[in-house]
Image (cartoon, rainbow, N blue to C red):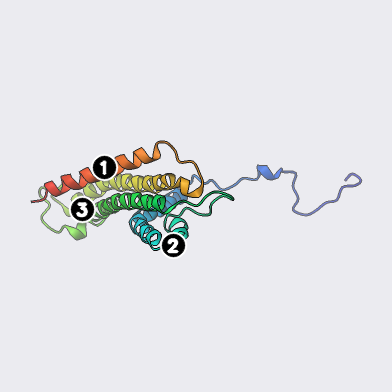
Amino acid sequence: MGAGRTYCPGMTNRHPAAVRRPDSSAGPPRLAAAARHAGLAVTLFPAGALAVCSTLTGHREAARRRWLRAGPLPLGAPAPGALRLVLHGALTILLGVLALLLAAALALAVARGLLYGFVDRAPHDTSWGGPSLAGAWLAHFAVSLPCVALVLVILTGLTRLNRHTTAPLRGERRPAWALPTAAVSCALGLLFVVAFVHQLP
């Protein structure tokens, strides 16, 4: 061993940057993140309603930071006014209504897929995969899987869309596509509700 060198147990010549880190793109973390975003999307409606109520009762900072989840403002950035907070709260409510509709569709997909055998005990002669219960259950489960995945993706998108629309409340720049996308999403949700009501007996 050369002069001036000391040996420390456990030391290696590997550069710290070369240490392998856990892969953040693994399946379970991504699934957990999707479930967390979906849960946040379902809470958009009450969060928006509470933001509007807090603003109208004079608690603007609580509305901005707690209910609209804007976080702290950069140093020197002006606080948003009451009108802006109310408008953001109203938009959050609309996105929350859309999220609740999707959550209902998600619950229906789970009930008619994973839990099909418990919710539908009728004869399965004309059901997908019938006439046996096992075949019908398997067929409905296979159909529900992509539906559940699609709804989770859309709910995750709504959570991120809401964060983009509230960017000015954090002193950040809002993407130009955020508000048009939110408006189109709300319009599509309204059309879905109208179509669903019209098909009811």
Q: Residues within 10 Å of mark 2 (few under 14, many from 20)?
A: some
Name which of mark 1 and mark 2 comes first in the sequence. 2
Q: Is residue 167 left or right of residue 93?
A: right
Which mark lies nearer to you, 1 or 2?
A: 2
Element at badge 3?
Answer: helix
Name the amino acid, label 3. Ala
Give the residue pinned by disc 1: 187
Which mark lies nearer to you, 2 or 3?
A: 2
Name the amino acid, label 1. Ala
Element at badge 1?
Answer: helix
Q: Residue furthest top?
A: 176
Q: Is residue 172 left or right of residue 158?
A: right
Which residue shows up at 77% across the image and 54% down it? 9
Q: Residue furthest left?
A: 201
Height in image: 51 above or below 160? below
Which residue shows up at 90% across the image and 47% down it? 4
Give the residue pinned by disc 3: 134
Q: Position of residue 167 (x, y in %)?
A: 46, 46
Q: CA distance from mark 1 to mark 2?
A: 31 Å
Residue 129 in view, yes or no = no
Give the residue pinned by disc 2: 59
